[in-house]
Image (cartoon, grey):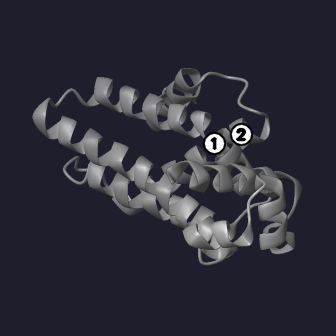
Amino acid sequence: MKEKQSLIEQHFLKLLEAHRFREITIKMICEEAHINRSTFYSYFLDKYDLLDRLIDHHLSALNEMSTQFLTGLEEQGDRHELSKAFLKDQFQYIYDNKVFFKTLMTVHPAQNFTQKFIQMLRVNYLRMIENQNIQYAEYFVNYTLGGQFGIIFFWLQNDCPESSEEVADIVYRNILKTNR
């Protein structure tokens, strides 16, 4: 069962690389995935449902990483090493799902994805720094997110030439202001 759903999602992403979302039809998805319309509709209501579920899946996975990071901070407390590991894991996830992120951020940007992605990051960063006595925390987080989003965009747009570890280090050093 899950196999067919994954097949539909993969072929939908392949279509998204070549076509704008509004141009893609259920017929195109079914032809690309070599399935019947009834098979598509047994998993998804329509193409909007398919896109929303893909977005929710990836944002939930990234959100879970943030939750695990926060739990680790409470239990262990070594903020620097945990932060580096968290950023590396986050960028590795983006790299492992490069087609999805690259397509929705750079090839055919999806505004609803970008807004949800940035909001999820914002909420998690605010949670991460809530006990850090940072002046104007909202401004710091928004500034940091603007830079991080720009780095993610640039990295994806250039087909991820650096490793996830290298990009995580770039972001980490910029957050600490040691790379300016």
Verify CB contact (< 8 Å) between mark 2 and mark 1.
Answer: yes
* Image coordinates for residue 177, horizontal then vertical, percent: 48, 33
Which picture quadrant has residue 151?
top right
Residue depicted at x 47% and y 37%:
90
Q: What SS does tag 2 mark?
A: helix
* Image coordinates for residue 106, horizontal then vertical, percent: 76, 52
Q: Which mark is residue 156?
A: 2
Residue 136: tell me if it is visible. Answer: no
Report the side of 98 relative to 165 (left or right). Answer: right
Report the side of 164 relative to 22 (left or right). Answer: left
Q: Disc 2 to disc 1, how far (Cα)?
A: 6 Å
Please name whichever residue, 165 or 146, is drawn nearer the observer in this view of the structure: 165
* Image coordinates for residue 30, horizontal then vertical, percent: 78, 63
Residue depicted at x 26% and y 41%:
68
Residue 61: tell me if it is visible. Answer: yes
Residue depicted at x 49% and y 62%:
56
Q: Which residue is mark 1?
A: 152
Amino acid marked by disc 1:
Ile
